[in-house]
Amino acid sequence: MVDKGVVIVVSGPSGSGKSTICSYILKENGSSFGLVVSHTSRVPREGEVDGIHYHFLSKEVFLENKKNGLYLEWAEVHGNLYGTPIDQVEDSVAKQKNIILEIDVQGGLQVKAKMPEAVLIFVSPPSYKELENRLRGRQTDSDEVIVKRLENAVGEMQKIKQYDYFIINKDLQVAINDVILIGTTERKRVLRLNLNEIFDSMRFPKFQK
Ligand code: 5GP
């Protein structure tokens, strides 16, 4: 009944829990969501699989792709390049599937500039202290990396005003439900609907624009 799927951007500081939220939603609602796998110049972490977690590319190939206009948005985050392949996004929305782009704030704002109908959700940790606890608790990053991520978080939090929705991730299940609810609600926006098709299917007289 709708023209296109909704492009949902989820951003927030590293440690906000946005990855956990997004992967849960994709796992549980796979059939209604299209999958978009980002490109990155970062080297894979242990357990990461090429084509599933990311498409891992050299910096040279990434920059060539960028030059050829392959990315809807791209950004340098923590010293590595990341980009969203535009063809994957277009394919999914044309098939009326929603997509979730778990990308940083620079990328999120580029998506909004190119696709004003995209929905931008900012996920925040409940406090600065909790963010620090989560980053240290992971035991995956060096002290230097943690300090850099905390510094970046301060800058990212300042971009909240340019986002459409703000979720404080205090309780994971509540945050997951909130993101799902936003997606469901946005899909019902009159502006996204093909009213002619809907009226035809309801056998109402033709809708007059
Ligand atoms: P990580 O390397 O830890 O997987 O991701 C680091 C950061 O890059 C996260 O904030 C993540 O959301 C962001 N990121 C992942 N993919 C993309 C992308 O395609 N574009 C942008 N702009 N950021 C991305």
Image: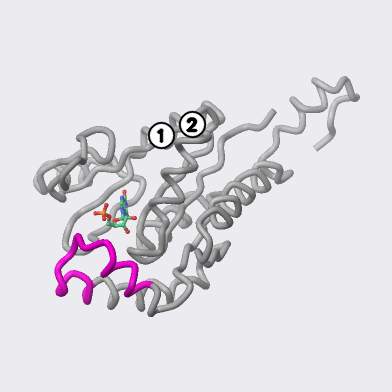
What range of the chain is rendered magenta? Answer: 131-148
- The answer to whether mark 1 is within 8 Å of ligand 1 is no
Q: Are marks 2 and 1 in contact (CB under 8 Å)?
A: yes
Residue in the image at 82% along x and 27% along y: 199
Q: Quadrant of residue 146?
A: bottom left
Residue in the image at 37% along x and 66% along y: 13
Q: Is residue 87 left or right of residue 75?
A: right
- The answer to whether mark 2 is within 8 Å of ligand 1 is no
Instruction: From the viewer's side, name the closer residue of 139 and 28.
Output: 139
Hey, what amino acid is under mark 1? Leu
Q: Which residue is mark 1?
A: 35
Residue in the image at 14% along x and 68% along y: 142
Q: Residue 99: x percent and y percent? A: 48, 40
Around disc 2, counting alpha carbons within 10 Å, would you say few (fewer than 14), some (14 to 19), or many (20 or more)?
few
Hey, what amino acid is under mark 2? Gly
Q: Which residue is mark 2?
A: 30
Could you tell me which quadrant the N terminus lies in?
top right
